[in-house]
Image (spheres, helix red, strand yellow):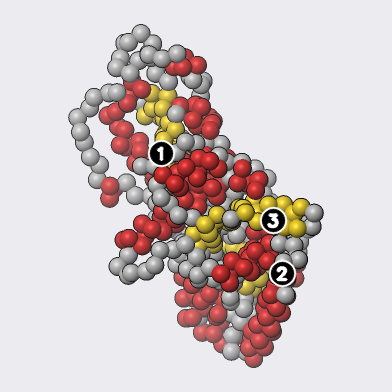
């Protein structure tokens, strides 16, 4: 158990740990005011598809000692909200109230089923003090019967349709955002891309390392504004919320578009009109396995891919990739008289830190430039918020480090501790109780390298590490 002076630190630590471990972490908050203090952390967990279990108390509902746990303090009247769950309901996969100790474990189990079922996200459970003080006989649940929803697969006709379209397209493109959360998925995406020479992969979410930046098919990471969408004739959206900005870089009207996602309709986003000729609620790892296996075993597609044009397409794609990387490499300008900018910082970090470093990034638009320079290629090596509640990374970096250390402790293979490098803008750093995060890091001895990006002043960039 980790004591946090600030609720936003607590939920951000839980968020970071869950992103690495895949297991929901619990946050305990104090009634309505503690729930409100979770603030943007609930948004981040919801948008970022992170399983977090939040528990908060309710004010006692008796005031004269009728039951154990009845009101005894001044604030027990002031902190009774008409509907406390409503504070976070629109961001949670499930909200509930424990009304008796006799089914408390079932209520927790049900909440965890929602948190762990895709699209994963925060859940919120409350209980009044009378319920928490209730005496019951000990009991247990068979955890094997309280599992989340299993991964969904694509129907057979969809597998063939998607594969045929990607293979026969002249300018195929895959756009992703969250698929790398499952560390098994980037390799499968590489396997798919290697089967179709000339295909491109673009990351619009930047919340995970979804596709290696060292692969020639990589178009890098941009916040949905890259020009690569404008000439694509076939697009596969893979766990992606915002593939392009309709007013800036929409694909051609003639493009064939397919969408595979744990939430392909973006059910919690009221306005989201990205068109697609087919949508499937499926898990990326399972779907990619199906696509790869189908292409490898479909003789007609194998014959098509033997055409010499695919070899030429692959060569052209590699040359385009080399040109893009050369342009990125030319951006850093190092020297005492040169302004320190995101290109320089990204270059220095890549050259100075070990390849096993895990980067926790909250640098807003500068994250795109840092991604250019770092070119993350190892699953789990790049973790960005995905949401827009600034201040996430102060606590998330601590959770990431704790989860990595726990993974290493449970591993059969000895390996050096993973360095976590936390890169954050000064505004984001200040907006989420930095003193609380630093206190937790100090008290629990959680080592993290934090780099705060400061705005340029009189032509000079500044960096605080």
Q: Is residue 12 above or below residue 373?
A: above
The residue closer to the viewer here, 15 or 101, is 15
Question: Badge 1: how crowded within 10 Å, few (<14), some, or many (20+)?
Answer: some
| Residue matched to label 3 | 462
Q: Percent x, y for residue 307?
A: 63, 89
| Residue matched to label 1 | 3
Q: Secondary structure at mark 1?
A: loop
Q: Residue at x 59, y 85 (%)?
A: 305
Q: Secondary structure at mark 2?
A: loop
Q: Residue at x 54, y 85 (%)?
A: 302
User: Is residue 271 in sight in this rendering?
Assistant: yes
Alpha carbon distance from label 1 to label 2: 43 Å
| Residue matched to label 2 | 335
Residue 392 left/right relative to 110: right
Alpha carbon distance from label 2 to label 3: 14 Å
Q: Percent x, y for residue 298?
A: 50, 81
Residue 315 left/right relative to 3: right
Q: Which of the 4 quarters of the picture holds residue 225?
A: bottom right
Q: Is residue 197 above or below residue 462?
A: below
Question: Badge 3: how crowded within 10 Å, few (<14), some, or many (20+)?
Answer: some
Alpha carbon distance from label 3 to label 1: 33 Å
Q: Which of labels 3 and 1 is toward the front?
A: 3
Q: Residue at x 72, y 69 (%)?
A: 335
Q: Percent x, y for residue 50?
A: 49, 49
Q: Which of the 4 quarters of the picture holds residue 1?
A: top left
Earlier along the polypeptide chain: callout 2 or callout 3?
2
User: Is residue 91 in sight in this rendering?
Assistant: no
Q: Is residue 272 above or below residue 81?
A: below
Residue situated furthest left in the rendering: 137
Earlier along the polypeptide chain: callout 3 or callout 1?
1
Q: Percent x, y for residue 104?
A: 31, 33
The residue closer to the viewer here, 136 or 341, is 341
């Amino acid at each position: 158990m980790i004591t946090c002076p600030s609720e936003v630190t607590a939920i951000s630590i839980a968020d970071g740990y869950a992103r690495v471990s895949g297991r929901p972490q619990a946050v305990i908050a104090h009634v309505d005011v503690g729930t409100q203090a979770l603030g943007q952390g609930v948004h981040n967990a919801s948008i970022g598809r992170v399983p977090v279990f939040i528990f908060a108390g309710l004010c006692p509902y008796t005031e004269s000692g009728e039951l154990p746990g009845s009101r005894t303090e001044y604030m027990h009247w002031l902190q009774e909200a008409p509907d406390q769950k409503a504070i976070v309901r629109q961001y949670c996969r499930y909200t509930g109230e424990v009304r008796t100790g006799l089914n408390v474990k079932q209520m927790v189990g049900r909440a965890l089923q929602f948190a762990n079922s895709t699209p994963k996200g925060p859940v919120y459970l409350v209980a009044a003090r009378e319920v928490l003080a209730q005496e019951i006989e000990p009991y247990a649940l068979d955890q094997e019967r309280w599992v989340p929803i299993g991964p969904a697969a694509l129907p057979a006709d969809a597998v063939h349709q998607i594969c045929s379209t990607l293979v026969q397209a002249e300018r195929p493109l895959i756009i992703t955002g969250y698929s790398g959360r499952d560390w098994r998925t980037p390799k499968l995406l590489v396997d798919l891309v290697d089967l179709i020479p000339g295909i491109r992969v673009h990351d619009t979410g930047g919340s995970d390392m979804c596709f290696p930046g060292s692969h020639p098919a990589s178009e890098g990471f941009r916040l949905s504004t890259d020009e690569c969408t404008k000439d694509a004739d076939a697009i596969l959206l893979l766990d992606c919320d915002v593939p392009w900005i309709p007013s800036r870089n929409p694909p051609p009207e003639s493009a064939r578009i397919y969408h595979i996602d744990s939430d392909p309709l973006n059910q919690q986003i009221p306005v989201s009109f990205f068109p697609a000729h087919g949508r499937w609620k499926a898990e990326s790892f399972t779907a990619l396995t199906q696509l790869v296996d189908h292409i490898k075993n479909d003789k007609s597609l194998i014959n098509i891919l033997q055409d010499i044009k695919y070899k030429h397409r692959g060569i052209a794609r590699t040359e385009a990739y080399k040109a893009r990387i050369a342009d990125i490499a030319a951006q850093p300008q190092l020297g005492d008289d040169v302004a320190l900018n995101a290109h320089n910082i990204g270059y220095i970090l890549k050259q100075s830190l070990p390849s096993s470093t895990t980067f926790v990034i909250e640098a807003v638009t500068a994250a795109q430039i840092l991604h250019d320079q770092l070119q993350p290629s190892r699953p789990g090596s790049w973790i960005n918020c995905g949401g827009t509640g600034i201040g996430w990374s102060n606590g998330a970096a601590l959770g990431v480090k704790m989860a990595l250390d726990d993974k290493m402790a449970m591993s059969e293979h000895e390996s050096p501790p993973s360095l976590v490098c936390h890169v954050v803008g000064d505004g984001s750093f200040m907006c989420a109780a930095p003193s609380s995060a630093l206190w937790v890091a100090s008290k629990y001895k959680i080592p993290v390298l934090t780099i705060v990006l400061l705005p340029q002043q009189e032509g000079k960039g500044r960096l605080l590490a």
